[in-house]
Amino acid sequence: MNTPSDAAPRPALRELTPLEARVLGVLVEKQHTVPDTYPLSLNSLTAGCNQKTARSPVMNVSEDEVLTTIDGLKRLSLVIEGSSSRVPRFEHNVNRVLGVPSQSVALLATLFLRGPQTAAELRANSARLHSFADISSVESFLDELASSEPPRVVRLPRVPGERENRWAHLLCGEVSFSEALARDAQGGESFSLSEFEALKSEQKRLAHEVVQLRAIVQRMAGELGISLDQPASDA
């Protein structure tokens, strides 16, 4: 069995798009749940991406969007196209590219498909991909993924009213606590790929504006001789 220590050093992996993560999650899932039809055709893969059950958020993407996404994943060696069929079929290569065991791939795929979850939820939701003996076993693999370089998952702050922390994957970039809450609030609402990209672009624009406003406030405070580090009561 290949292990990370046996493999050559891997180049840094760029951030994945939400649809790229969804495609990988579907491929891992279907590899275990419908092995007779795996590797998947483009039609089956698109249907898996748009599936309304066991998905958060629900997506509504076209075959053209999925095909474009596959091309990007093929360049990263995360997806391989089979050549033994008249109909192109696709399979994932997550284990080798990330250098992680199948147990970790099962957890990552479940996070790709369902969003942030507690260790208990991950154990239940990944049961068809891998049967974990107990929650501590799940936490052990999560800790391993979180301590890898670069980290692949992160433990989120505890949501008010909940007893356990949730975990989120980092393959699409950093995940903020507010983003995780917003994702939960959205529930089963359906989003297209273009809407995902628009939201991401808007978030970056707002973050840039906050940086600019902060710089303006600091400059004005300096001109007025006001220290922003002091409490208002000391002014």
Image: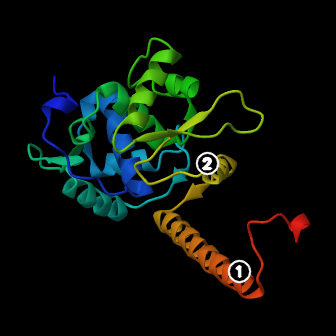
> From where the camera sits, is residue 219 visible?
yes
Question: Who's the residue at 59% across and 35% down the image?
Answer: 166
Vertically, is 176 above or below 200? above
Residue furthest left as drawn: 84
> Mark 2 packing: few (<14 Cα in 10 Å), some, or many (20+)?
some
User: Spatial distance from mark 2 to mark 1, Cα to Cα?
Assistant: 30 Å
Vertically, is 25 above or below 210? above
Picture coordinates of residue 35 (x, y %)? 27, 29
Report which quarter residue 235 is drawn in.
Answer: bottom right
Picture coordinates of residue 8 (x, y %)? 12, 40
Q: Give the structural element (helix, strand or loop) at label 2.
A: helix
Amino acid type, mark 2: Ala
Question: Who's the residue at 74% across and 66% down the image?
Answer: 229
Question: Who's the residue at 26% across and 54% down the image?
Answer: 73
Q: Give the structural element (helix, strand or loop) at label 1.
A: helix
Report which quarter residue 224 is drawn in.
Answer: bottom right
Direction from residue 100 to residue 19 in the image, left or right: right
Picture coordinates of residue 218 (x, y %)? 68, 79
Residue furthest top as drawn: 133
Vertically, is 175 above or below 137? below
The mark closer to the camera, 2 or 1, is 1
- The residue to which callout 1 is attached is 217
Picture coordinates of residue 110 (x, y %)? 45, 35
